[in-house]
Image (cartoon, rainbow, N blue to C red):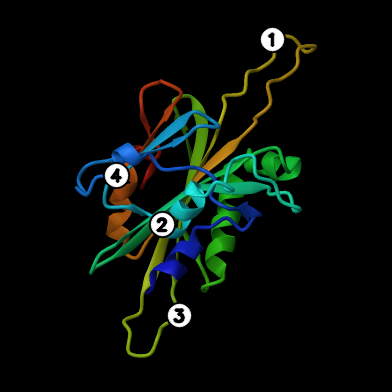
């Protein structure tokens, strides 16, 4: 299986725009056992991921282009945007992940995304269905990341068999969480703090035993303590 089809599996099907953030250059080491980091300055969130993953060259080129900034606009509103993509290709496996943000550019999309479980299930099925008949291997499991409501769904799909090639299955995980913790109004007359962003993490691999890589991803809200994106307790 070539790299690009694997990458396409994890792209959101709801209006995804060009990559708009720049990976931290200071974390660009060659040791695959050391973590790398990516900082989203718009939301002041830092993501940490295994060093075996290399940022996609095309996305890096777009990130470093002067015309590619978070303020760039197009004629068509983007309901969601991919902020970072990286992949890992070895002689025995291909894995990739994408970080995406859904904001209030499209209020209806954001409102649907805040349901988390149903939204994630619908999206992962839609993303995989173009390659075959996907199977949900773990229904939506809810948890929290540093107080932020989150949920994850696992699914898989058999890939079309090429002549002379061994049949392969792509395994996917999609986790989304609220970018801010909604504050409940103390009085009915007080305005409710709305959810302003839903952040998503999409992961695909060709080997189910590589799901353990999910546990090596973490994030840091503002200057708080880094928290795992996918705690080991939520994967069954």
Marks 3 and 4: which is nearer the front? 4
Residue 140 showing in the rendered view:
no
Q: Name above or below for residue 181 compared with residue 3.
A: above
- Distance CA(mark 3)–CA(mark 1): 54 Å
- Disc 1 on helix, strand or loop? loop
Residue 58 showing in the rendered view:
yes
| Of the image marks 3 and 1, the number of the one nearer the N terminus | 3
**Labelled pair 4, 1 in contact (Cβ < 8 Å):** no
- Distance CA(mark 2)–CA(mark 3): 24 Å
- On the image, the x and y values in percent for residue 168 come to 36, 74
Rendered image: mark on residue 186? 1
| Of the image marks 4 and 1, the number of the one nearer the N terminus | 4
- Distance CA(mark 4)–CA(mark 1): 46 Å
Determine which residue is flagged by label 3.
160
Determine which residue is flagged by label 4.
28
Q: Which of 102 and 75 is in front in this view?
A: 75
- The residue that appears at 29% across and 56% down in the rendered structure is 210
Marks 2 and 3: which is nearer the front? 2
Quadrant showing the N terminus: bottom left
Q: Nearer the viewer, residue 22 or 117?
A: 22
Rendered image: mark on residue 56? 2
């Amino acid at each position: 299986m070539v790299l690009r089809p694997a990458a396409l599996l994890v792209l959101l099907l709801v209006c995804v725009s060009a990559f708009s953030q720049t990976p931290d250059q200071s974390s660009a080491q060659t040791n695959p056992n050391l973590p790398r980091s990516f900082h989203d300055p718009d939301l002041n969130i830092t993501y940490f991921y295994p060093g075996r993953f290399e940022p996609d060259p095309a996305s890096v080129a777009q990130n470093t282009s002067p015309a590619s900034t978070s303020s760039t606009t197009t004629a068509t509103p983007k309901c969601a945007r991919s902020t970072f993509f990286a992949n890992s290709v070895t002689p025995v496996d291909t894995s990739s992940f994408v970080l995406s943000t859904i904001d209030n550019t499209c209020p209806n999309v954001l409102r649907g995304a805040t349901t988390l479980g149903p939204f994630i299930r619908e999206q992962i099925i839609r993303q995989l269905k173009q390659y075959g008949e996907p199977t949900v291997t773990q229904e939506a499991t809810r948890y929290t990341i540093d107080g932020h409501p989150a949920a994850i769904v696992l699914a898989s799909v058999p890939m079309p068999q090429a002549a002379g090639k061994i049949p392969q299955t792509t395994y996917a995980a999609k986790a989304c969480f609220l970018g801010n913790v909604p504050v409940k109004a103390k009085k009915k007359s007080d305005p409710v703090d709305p959810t302003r962003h839903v952040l998503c993490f999409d992961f695909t691999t060709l080997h189910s035993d590589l799901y353990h890589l999910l546990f090596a991803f973490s994030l840091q809200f503002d200057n708080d303590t880094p928290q795992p994106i996918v705690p080991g307790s939520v994967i069954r």
